[in-house]
Image: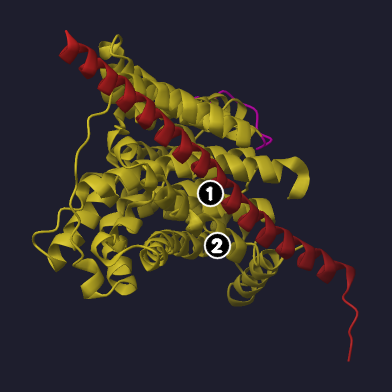
Chain colours: A red, B yellow
């Protein structure tokens, strides 16, 4: 049989839902931010290696 | 409001039932004696067991100072309603309560100690640092059953294994449990070499621990090392504005280290600033070490949830790598132990992973990977703290 929750119980339920949602949301945002750092790292590494390769090629030409 | 208040009320009820003749003054003196014993225990742990001595030693001594009957050293504490000019109260008010100066300055020293080289060489390790923060959010969700959401978030941040972040988040969220959270966080950080091997062995098979990984070192240009802290600061501050102070100070410290023109300042930040600020921080937190705040059911529950946060953190990192291994070719599989290093306890966690890996296979050399995951965990923990502040200070809590 359906039972009506008291106002107090409603508040408790809402708080728990918010906790779960904000927990997962924060974790997802964290993963997203780390993803952006990952892409930045890949880009930085690629640019640096390319610059180093070009430098070596120039030295070899000389 | 919540189940926690119910437990506290029940405890008070039981106390009055079994000690009907006890008066308030008697309880107060008993509480002070217990807290002085706690202070002596902290000093013992700092000296004999070498558990975070730069912090636990001043904290222990501060606990004795504050709890001597008639002591005025903590008078004038913000929010206590007492007037006075106690030096420890002043340190707390200025260094922690009003501007959070001390934890933020400590981050400069920590940043100057970190070498992000292993992470820059193996960028995929950044995701281990993200997975390793799972314990913060999972324990926060569990703690929210008993505590108000903001307190639950502050308790969850114990799992960051990062003292300054724990102080800053619990302070900004106005948690009533700053002192127990800080003590529990630092004690568990010191217990990483005991807790983590057990969790690592429980979550992996011997066959998985034996997986051998070969490390190919690549050169990193100075420019990359200089750009990295700037990029991380911009990315993290844009996604979670409240993490700007935390990440910014950490990365500024790292920039000092990598720029190459401020070597003496970098060394000063590592060798002088960091231990000095830890010492002052330990004294500044002492006014919170009183029986009324610490000898509660809440503290006991914080000890339990703090341990859970550490266990979940390690397990989340391990399971993340196990899941990743499903999609990776057999010859390139990653040793799941590396996942356990995705927390902020640097470099203890890396050493634990290396040790457990070598116990399974003497030819295993996981340290370079573990160090990369460990520094990723440091970025992850400050970012997690900032994200919780951004989400919860925005009115959700």
Q: Is residue B44 visible?
A: no
Q: Chain of mark 2?
A: B
Q: Which residue is mark 2?
A: B138
Q: How many marks?
A: 2
Residue B262 image offset from top left, x and y in percent:
30, 10
Percent across and percent down for residue B324 are 40, 62
- Please tell me how crowded label 1 is: few (under 14), some (14-19), or many (20+) other residues with Cα within 10 Å: many
Q: Is residue B24 left or right of residue B185?
A: right
Q: Main secondary structure of the magenta part?
A: loop
Q: Nearer the viewer, mark 2 or mark 1?
A: 1
- Which residue sits at x=51%, y=28%? B233
Q: Is residue B86 magenta?
A: yes
Which numbered disc covers residue B303? Answer: none
Question: Circle 1 sits in a helix, a strand or a loop, which is it?
Answer: helix
Q: Give the magenta part as a residue range.
A: B79-89
**Residue B344 place in picture, x, y as percent:** 38, 45
- Verify whether residue B87 appears in magenta: yes
Q: Quadrant of residue B117?
A: top left
Q: Is residue B118 visible?
A: yes
Drawn side of residue B237 relative to residue B346, left or right: right
Residue on which disc 1 sits: A31
In the rendered view of the protein, which quadrant contains the N terminus of chain B? bottom right
> For numbered disc 2, what is the local secondary structure?
helix
Horizontal and vertical percent position of residue B224: 35, 24
Q: Residue drawn at (58%, 58%), measured in percent from left and top?
A: B140
Observer-nearest residue: B378 or B190?
A: B378
């Amino acid at each position: 049989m359906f039972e009506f929750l008291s106002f107090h119980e409603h508040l408790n339920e809402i708080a728990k839902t918010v906790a779960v949602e904000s927990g997962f949301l924060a974790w997802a945002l964290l993963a997203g931010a780390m993803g952006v750092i990952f892409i930045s790292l890949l880009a930085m590494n690629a640019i640096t290696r390319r610059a180093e390769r070009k430098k070596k090629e120039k030295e070899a030409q000389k | 409001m919540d189940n926690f208040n119910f437990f506290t009320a029940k405890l008070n009820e039981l106390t009055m039932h079994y000690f009907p003749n006890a008066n308030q003054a008697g309880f107060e003196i008993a509480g002070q004696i217990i807290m002085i014993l706690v202070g002596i225990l902290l000093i013992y742990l700092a000296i004999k067991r070498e558990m975070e001595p730069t912090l636990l030693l001043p904290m222990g001594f501060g606990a004795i100072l504050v709890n001597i009957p008639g002591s005025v050293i903590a008078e004038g504490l913000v929010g206590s309603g007492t007037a006075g000019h106690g030096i420890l109260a002043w340190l707390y008010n200025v260094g922690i309560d009003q501007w959070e100066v001390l934890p933020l300055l400590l981050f400069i020293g920590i940043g100057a100690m970190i070498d992000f080289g292993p992470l820059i060489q193996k960028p995929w390790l950044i995701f281990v640092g993200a997975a390793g923060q799972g314990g913060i959010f999972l324990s926060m969700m569990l703690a929210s059953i008993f505590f108000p959401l903001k307190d639950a978030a502050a308790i969850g941040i114990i799992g960051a294994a990062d003292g300054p972040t724990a102080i800053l988040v619990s302070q900004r969220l106005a948690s009533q449990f700053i002192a127990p959270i800080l003590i529990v966080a630092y004690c568990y950080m010191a217990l990483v070499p005991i807790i983590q091997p057990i969790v690592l062995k429980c979550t992996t098979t011997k066959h998985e621990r034996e997986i051998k990984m070969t490390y190919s070192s690549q050169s990193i240009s100075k420019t990359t090392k200089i750009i990295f802290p700037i990029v991380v600061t911009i990315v993290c501050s844009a996604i979670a504005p409240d993490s700007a102070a935390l990440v910014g100070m950490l990365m500024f410290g790292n920039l000092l280290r990598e720029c190459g023109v401020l070597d003496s300042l970098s060394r000063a930040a590592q060798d002088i600033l960091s231990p000095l600020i830890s010492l002052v921080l330990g004294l500044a937190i002492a006014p919170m070490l009183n029986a009324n705040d610490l000898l509660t059911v809440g503290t006991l529950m914080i000890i339990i949830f703090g341990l859970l946060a550490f266990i979940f953190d390690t397990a989340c990192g391990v399971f993340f790598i196990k899941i990743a291994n499903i999609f990776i070719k057999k010859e390139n599989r990653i040793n799941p132990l590396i996942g356990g290093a995705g927390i902020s306890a640097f470099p203890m966690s890396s050493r634990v992973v290396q040790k457990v890996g070598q116990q399974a296979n003497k030819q295993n050399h996981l340290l370079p990977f573990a160090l990369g995951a460990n520094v990723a965990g440091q970025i992850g923990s400050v970012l997690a703290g900032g994200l919780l502040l951004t989400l919860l200070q925005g009115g959700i809590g």
